Amino acid sequence: MNRRLVLGALALASVVGALPAFAAAGVQLPRFVSSTLPNGAIVALVEKRDTPLLSLNATVRGGALGDAPGRDGTASLFADLIQKGAGERNAAQFAEAIENVGGSLSAGAGSEALTIRATFLARDADLMLELVADVLQRPRLEPAEFDQVRTLAVQSIAAAKDSDPRALLGSYGDAWLLRGHPYGRPVGGSESTLAAIELGDVQHFYRDQVGGDRLIITIVGDFDAAAMAQELEWKFGAWRKAALPLPAAAAPARATGRTVLLVDKPGATQTYFWLGNVGASRTDPARTAQSVVNTVFGGRFTSMLNTELRIKSGLTYGASAGFDRGSQPGAFSISSFTETSKTVEAIDMALATLARLHQDGLSAEQLQSARSYILGQFPPTLETNGQIAARLADMLFHGLGPDDVNEYATRVAQVDAEAARKAIEQSFPRSENLAIVLIGDAEKIRDAVKKYGPVTEMKLTDPRFAPAAK
């Protein structure tokens, strides 16, 4: 075997001496062993024998960044399609193999990765690995199944437009704020790009963008790590490499000033709004302080935003804010919805709340409340095998060490007024520098929203998430 034991990849000092599940400083990442297979695939294993279950997370770097121009949604269709038959099993046989043992297997695409998640009883480990290996290395990609998943993807977008466009608000927001940048392209595609994708595009995507050199596998559960490592090398170690280099995105530029995209939904009784600018990456050194600040500002029910827009004024059923973190900074956005006649009042209140955050910062009481809230919410995010496998994969993907988990409570406790002030100044946009997206009845709100900046209009029925290029 040519396997190289890699504990340094995550700065783990030793294979022996398991870390406790919890320590006084907070949650601790369980002990794991990591290895690199001959083709470059990374494997990380956690023995956790409290339940007879295995959870697997397989991450393939690249994702929607590998979609060809004008073919946004290819990675997403590929992720849907590989669940519709692989190896010797057609779609029905593949589903039956999972259901007959009470397991689960799903696949999805993100901007920078494809992810497969599986959970099976420990006794069915061989079947789980066989199915995952088939999905990755022997997908059937059958024409009839492709037609169905593409049709369903288009219908899902159309249905959201007809009923509740909140699910699409982020796609419009990213496309408007990040136009011209890879993060601005819709991962799931638009009606126009999905219609342009053919089965050959998906096949080329698989050849060019999916391979063993991009693979990260994490498994947590009831198994012997040494035996599992050998099995994974046998099943995945000789898998071919992706044909093209790994795509990457540069950091997007922050927006200056305000621009407004008005998406016309005639007859709408509500206006859905999204206010955003470029925020912070997954590895930003100030990410803990950003999370503490956003907990107060827009990250929980009693946040500043929700208090003003829902609890006090009753303008909406909810308002929130958050960071979309990738290898590069994605959007920081505020989103909500309100009755059409209250559009300006609600947006003004959101802008005023953002301005107040910059003017006043956080009080000592707000900081303490946010720290306590975060520390109380964090442990349940690392309870199950699947949660641990996903977090470990995320750390490996972003090159983070165990300290990302092990020292999290300490970092939260160290966020003081000065750290919060710096996070607000550096990572939270000012109210005068925002990309604004409104989905509503343009005839009723067009003139009123001109005060926020130059207005560009498109129709909700347009088969894309941004205005057509001129």
Image (cartoon, helix red, strand yellow):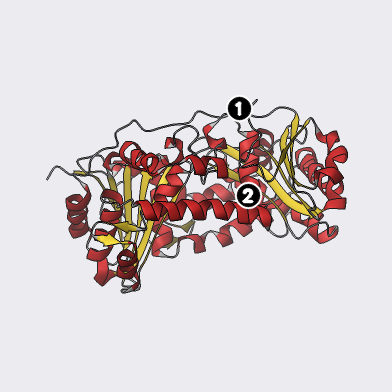
Would you call the spot at circle 1 few (<14 residues within 10 Å), some (14-19), or many (20 or more)?
few
Q: Residue at x 85, y 57 (%)?
A: 313
**Place of residue 213 in the rendered image (x, y in percent of width and height, measured from the top left):** 28, 39
Of the image marks 1 and 2, the number of the one nearer the N terminus? 2
Instruction: Tell me if I can see residue 112 in this picture.
Output: no
Q: On the rendered structure, is 389 left or right of 283?
A: left
Which secondary structure, mark 2? helix
Is residue 139 shown above or below 417? below
Q: On the rendered structure, is 99 left or right of 346?
A: left
In this orientation, which residue lies closer to the viewer: 421 or 89? Answer: 89
Q: On the rendered structure, is 268 left or right of 420?
A: right
Instruction: Tell me if I can see residue 464 in this picture.
Output: yes
Amino acid type of disc 1? Ala
Front disc: 1 or 2: 2
Alpha carbon distance from label 1 to label 2: 23 Å
Residue under label 2: 168
Which secondary structure, mark 1? loop
**Place of residue 461 in the rendered image (x, y in percent of width and height, measured from the top left):** 67, 46
In this orientation, which residue lies closer to the viewer: 193 or 447? Answer: 193
Q: State which quarter of the image contains the N terminus.
A: top left
Q: Residue at x 36, y 61 (%)?
A: 118
Residue under label 1: 253
Is residue 262 shown above or below 33? above
Would you call the spot at circle 2 few (<14 residues within 10 Å), some (14-19), or many (20 or more)?
some
| Quarter-of-image position of residue 51 | bottom left
**Place of residue 144 in the rendered image (x, y in percent of width and height, measured from the top left):** 38, 55
| Quarter-of-image position of residue 201 | top left
